[in-house]
Image: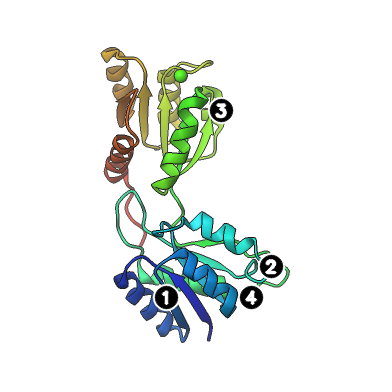
Amino acid sequence: MAFVVAALNTAETGQLVKAVLAGEGHSCAIFGTGEAAVAEALAGAPDLVIIERHLVDMSAAQVVEAMRSEPSTAGIPIVIHGRTDADDVPVLSASLREAVATALTPAPGMVRAAQTMDPVPKVLLVEDDASIAEPLIDGLARYGFAVDWVATGAAALSAPPAAMVLLDLGLPDIDGLEVCRQLRRTRDVPVIMLTARGDECDRVVGLELGADDYLAKPFSLRELVARMRAVGRRTRPTPAA
Ligand code: CA
């Protein structure tokens, strides 16, 4: 039996988590903020901490950082209980059960990594302009997207697989349309083109090459996230059981 501290946004999620933990014979204390959970972790030395990816006061990354910075909480495993941002489907309790079991499995000599329920969707941003890329990376992180950033077409083509590609068309080495064509030839990854060009021709060619959508710069973060979610829904593979 383990003692679990959880920071969860809603009573509904609290009930779910409590039920899953009770089913496994664990007890838990549930808090509404990251700050309260971190304080309880310091005071109560729990076996496990469960947090939601976006709490009212802190992001999951901030909670992880706060816990890792204190020697007495640094070794406590953390499960990030989240939703897939692309489709707003809550994670099933079965996978929470699995994540809890994995996190509580003793692994002598191993540094415990944060366990995530569903991996944060990795987005590949291909953009040579740092003044566009940097705020975009920060902004997308607030919506739960982890971003790998590359500044050239060549780097984009050799990057590890991503859940989605945000592709600037005006790149220094390879034309973005050619990058799109090559990406789509080898991978079934959704592509959203980001273009400074108001050129209808580029958009049409891009869409014909297999891009899933495009946004003309300047665009708002909210608009981009809305497009990303829509594209994610359209292109989402069959959910795993
Ligand atoms: Ca550019």
Which percent across, then down, holds residue 20?
A: 39, 78
Separation of marks 2 and 4 at Cα, in angstroms: 19 Å
The quarter holding residue 206 reads top left
Which percent across, then down, holds residue 190?
A: 36, 36
Type of the residue with mark 4: Pro
Q: Nearer the viewer, mark 2 or mark 4?
A: 2
Separation of marks 3 and 4 at Cα, in angstroms: 39 Å
Q: Is residue 112 visible?
A: yes
Q: Neighbour class for label 2 at 10 Å: few (<14), some, many (≥20)?
A: few
Type of the residue with mark 2: Pro
Which percent across, then down, holds residue 39?
A: 54, 71
Q: Earlier in the sequence, mark 4 or mark 1?
A: 1
Q: In the figure, 235 relative to 184: above or below?
A: below
Q: Earlier in the sequence, mark 3 or mark 2?
A: 2
Image quarter where the C terminus lies is bottom left
Which percent across, then down, holds residue 46?
A: 56, 78
Residue 71: which disc?
2
Residue at 40%, 37% in the rendered image: 189
Q: Earlier in the sequence, mark 2 or mark 4?
A: 2
Q: Earlier in the sequence, mark 1 or mark 3?
A: 1
Helix, strand or loop at mark 3: helix
Q: Nearer the viewer, mark 1 or mark 3?
A: 1
Circle 3 residue: 155
Question: Are the two marked residues, 2 and 4, in contact with CB atoms closer than 8 angstroms?
Answer: no
Helix, strand or loop at mark 4: loop
Separation of marks 1 and 3 at Cα, in angstroms: 44 Å
Separation of marks 3 and 2 at Cα, in angstroms: 39 Å
Q: Nearer the viewer, mark 4 or mark 1?
A: 1
